[in-house]
Image: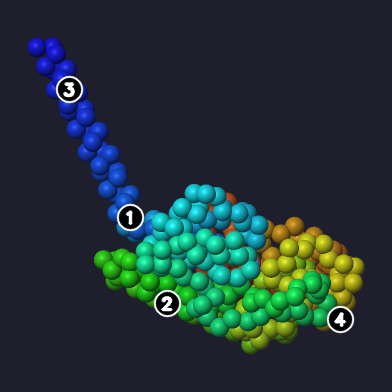
Amino acid sequence: MKNIFKMIFVIILFCCLFSLTGCIYKKSSEKLSIVATNFPCYDFARSIIKDSKSVNLKMLLKPGVESHDFEPTPQDIIDIKNSDIFIYVGGESDEWLEDILDDVDKKKTKVIKLLDLVDVSFEEYVEGMEEEYDDEKEYDEHVWTSLINTIKIIDKLKDEIIKIDSSNKIEYEKRASEYIDRLYKIDAEIRDIIDKSKRKEIIFGDRFPLLYFVKEYGLTYYAAFPGCSSETEASAKTISFLIDKVKDDKIPVVFHIELSSSKIAKTIANETGAKVLEFNSAHNISQEDFDDGKTYLDIMEDNVRVLKIALN
Ligand SMILES: [Zn+2]
């Protein structure tokens, strides 16, 4: 008798285990997967899918990490290949992807390259900038710094997400359109600030990944290095050029970008009395901000506040 009970117990246990693993397996295999390289790619997709139960979203870049130094793990490569949508920027910091993308089954994975969705500009060197020897002209990859570009990106991304998950079409359309409304609102605020401001010039004691932003709004800029430069030490010539610019044009704010040492900006500020503020180009965010759920829109709203100070 005892043995029969034991056997029944074991059978029940097995049944439970089987149905449980079956359940887990079914769930994970049914979930759609979107993989994004950096923070803007991730946040744009997140803004459309929100807490959708049917989609898994992964950012390859870890929060707080310098995005230009990114190296994929073997798991990252597997995740890219298994994804339903893979979103990347497509500029020089994504060169590591070339061979991996050749191996991706394009029938299974929709590959979205931000540089294909907007009009692109070449990297620029402006007066005073540290020159780096480059035999080839590269496209500036920071397309997301223009809110108008972001509107185009959201619109396209929403269409692609709906293609893989049409069951939530109405939700996705609603979120994308709310997001685009907010982008237009911030865009209008920026235009209003610039219209009414005393100056139309900004100075960065740092890299300058904001070419698309200044082009959109007709601002003049000076900076220590172009957008994706890996340099952090500026020459005395560059620093003194920027110091003279701040003094001559009575510039009240010297910017540095996010996750930067802000060393050059502080040096310029010490010599001129200008204030040091952060202008966030949204490449990536700190772990703390990530955990707080900070978004691209929050970052742009912060930028609106500092821009107002810098132009007045
Ligand atoms: Zn960059």
- Image height of 63 relative to 233, above or below: above
Q: Residue 92: horizontal and vertical position, in percent?
A: 63, 68
Of callouts 4 and 2, the N-terminal one:
2
Q: Residues within 10 Å of mark 4 (few under 14, many from 20)?
A: few
Contact? badges 2 and 1 (CB < 8 Å): no
Distance from Cα at disc 3 to Cα at disc 1: 33 Å
**Viewer-nearest of labels 4 and 3?**
3
Would you identify the image quadrant in which residue 237 lies? Answer: bottom right
Which of the two residues, 105 or 246, is positioned nearer the viewer here?
Answer: 105
User: Would residue 152 be found to the left or right of residue 251 on screen?
Assistant: left
Relative to residue 31, is residue 295 depicted above or below?
below
Residue identifier under label 1: 31
Q: Which amino acid is tagged 3?
A: Phe
The secondary element bearing badge 4 is classed as helix
Mark 3 or mark 4, which is nearer the start of the sequence? 3
| Residue type beneath disc 2 | Asp
The residues tagged by marks 2 and 1 sit, at their Cα atoms, a distance apart of: 23 Å
Which residue appears at 42% of the width and 77% of the height? Answer: 155
Q: Is residue 10 among what the camera can see?
A: yes
Alpha carbon of mark 1 to alpha carbon of mark 4: how far?
A: 58 Å
- In the picture, the disc for residue 248 is 4
The residue labelled by disc 3 is 9
Q: Residues within 10 Å of mark 2 (few under 14, many from 20)?
A: some
Pointer 1 or 4: first along the chain = 1
Rendered location of residue 2, percent (x, y): 13, 12
Which residue is at the front of the view, 170 or 307?
170
